[in-house]
Amino acid sequence: MPANGIRCRGAVAAPDNPYIYVDLKAGTRVDVTDLAAPTSTAWDIALKRSSIRLNSGDSGAGNRELAIVQAATLAEVTAAPASGYAIDGFTTADCMLDSLPGGEPNTAFGPWYDYADATHILSPKPEVYVIKRADGSRTAFRIVSYYDSTMSRGALYSVEWKQLP
């Protein structure tokens, strides 16, 4: 810990603040480290503060693809889209980071939230994300909220998901 007693956040303190890896098909957290995650096929998404990654492309070897569906509720999505899927690709051709305004990698999820400059509050967009796996299975995933019930702590995601036919 630094001499001033303040714990650093972000890339400098990444070992102390790892991503949380989730398998949405099984509905479980995956016990994998940030170092092992790029070669793991066990996880679907990774969450860390306002950054959400998909196990594909620049993030991992999982061959997941993501489609964004404009829908306010999970119930509105009854089938997976036939096209429009993307993978994580947040590095440019000259190996520079393609980032969102908040500094997080520009993953397949893109800017999944609206940001209020006056209040610094993140609000999930009315979107449902459909994850397609190499085995053909698909999961619809929606971010319900980013904060705790008092809106005093962020990165406490409330999410919902369901398997699609």
Image (tube, rainbow, N blue to C red):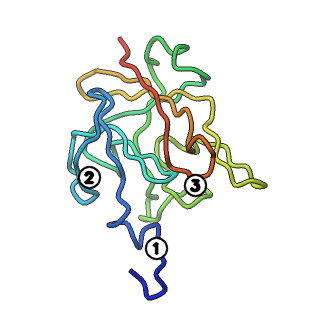
Using the image, tell me which numbered label, if any, was put on residue 100.
3
Q: How many marks?
A: 3
Residue at image mark 1: 8
Question: Dot 2, crowdedness within 10 Å: few (<14), some or many (≥20)?
Answer: some
In the picture, the disc for residue 38 is: 2
Q: Residues within 10 Å of mark 1 (few under 14, many from 20)?
A: few
**Residue at position x 47%, y 42% in the image:** 108
| Distance from Cα at disc 3 to Cα at disc 2 | 21 Å
Whether residue 70 is situated above or below residue 87 in the rendered picture: above
Q: Secondary structure at mark 3?
A: loop
Which residue type does callout 2 highlight? Pro
Q: Residue at x 32, y 39 (%)?
A: 22
Q: Residue at x 43, y 33 (%)?
A: 66
* Circle nearer the N terminus (3, 1): 1
Q: Is 118 located above or below residue 137 in the figure?
A: below
Q: Nearer the viewer, mark 2 or mark 1?
A: 1
Front-lying residue, 125 or 8: 8
Quadrant of the image occupied by residue 113? top right
Give the left or right position of residue 67, taking residue 39 as reference: right
Q: Amino acid at mark 1?
A: Cys
Q: Secondary structure at mark 2?
A: helix
Identity of the residue furthest to the right in this view: 118
In the rendered image of this protein, does residue 28 appear above or below residue 92?
Answer: above
Q: Position of residue 84 (x, y in %)?
A: 48, 27
Residue at the location (32% across, 37% down)? 44
In the image, what residue type sits under mark 3? Leu
Residue 63 coordinates in the image, percent (x, y) = 28, 37
Measure the C-alpha gap from mark 3 to mark 1: 21 Å
Q: Is label 2 in contact with label 1 (beta carbons under 8 Å)?
A: no
